């Protein structure tokens, strides 16, 4: 049973109605005022060509599968040369080291000191009532 859209000629009320395929009338009774409502052009329409034993869902599904396959092929091609096995990451006791821990102890201590200095600087600016980047201040 197809779903049709109707518009009342008297009150302008728009509604949808399931219509039996045997009924070919382009008019229906308005659900609001009871006057004659004319069938309007539907905002959704679908045309399916091909053999009658194949449903629209099957055609849409097949087309979607083709598009997803193209997408996956592009992704595979894009990432074909990027493989973690080719990258040699440092290990400690059989486990990979975190990226931020890379470097020797001097580098790690330098990053920690810098981070602590920035945090202290921010706290000092807050105590003085200065907003970040609003005015100059000693570092």
Image (cartoon, grey):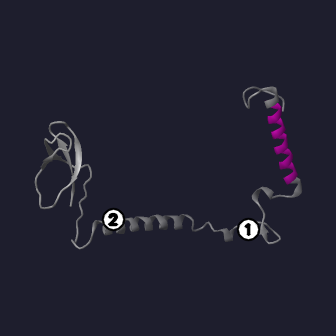
Q: What residue is rendered at 23% in x and 49% in y?
A: 16
28 sits to left or right of 104: left
Residue placed under numbered mark 1 in the picture = 88
Measured Cα–Cα span from mark 1 to mark 2:
45 Å
Number of residues whose C-alpha sits closer than 10 Å to that of mark 2, classed few (under 14), some (14–19) or many (20 or more): few
State the count of labels.
Answer: 2
Disc number at residue 60?
A: 2
Mark 1 nearby-residue class (10 Å; few <14, some 14–19, many ≥20): few
- Quarter assignment of residue 121: top right
Query: Where residue 50 sits: x, y (%)?
Result: 23, 69
**Quadrant where the C terminus is found in the figure:** top right
Q: Nearer the viewer, residue 103 or 117?
A: 117
* x 36%, y 67%: residue: 61
Which is the main secondary structure of the residues drawn in magenta?
helix
Return the residue nearer the eye: 112 or 61: 61
Task: Examine the rendered structure and indicate whether residue 131 appears above or below residue 75.
Answer: above
Q: Are marks 1 and 2 in contact (CB under 8 Å)?
A: no
Q: Quadrant of residue 133?
A: top right
Q: Quick check: 59 above or below 41?
A: below
Magenta segment = 108-125
Q: Residue at x 23, y 43 (%)?
A: 14
Residue 125 image position (x, y, % from top left):
80, 30
Q: Is residue 9 left or right of residue 113?
A: left
In magenta stretch: residue 81: no
Give SS at disc 1. Answer: loop
Q: Pick out the residue farthest to the bottom.
A: 53
On whether residue 123 falls in the magenta region, the answer is yes
User: Disc 1 vs disc 2: which is toward the camera?
Assistant: 2
């Amino acid at each position: 049973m197809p779903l049709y859209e109707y518009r009342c000629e008297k009150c302008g009320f728009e509604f949808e109605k399931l219509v039996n395929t045997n009924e070919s009338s382009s008019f229906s009774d308005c659900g609001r005022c009871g006057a004659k409502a004319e069938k309007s052009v539907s905002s959704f329409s679908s045309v399916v060509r091909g053999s009658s034993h194949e449903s629209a869902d099957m055609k849409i599904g097949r087309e979607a599968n083709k598009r997803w396959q193209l997408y996956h092929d592009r992704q595979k091609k894009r990432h074909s040369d990027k493989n973690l096995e080719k990258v040699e990451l440092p290990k400690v006791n059989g486990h990979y080291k975190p990226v931020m821990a890379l470097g020797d102890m001097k580098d790690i201590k330098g990053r920690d000191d810098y981070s602590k200095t920035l945090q202290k600087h921010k706290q000092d600016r807050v105590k003085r009532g200065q907003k970040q980047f609003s005015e100059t201040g000693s570092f």
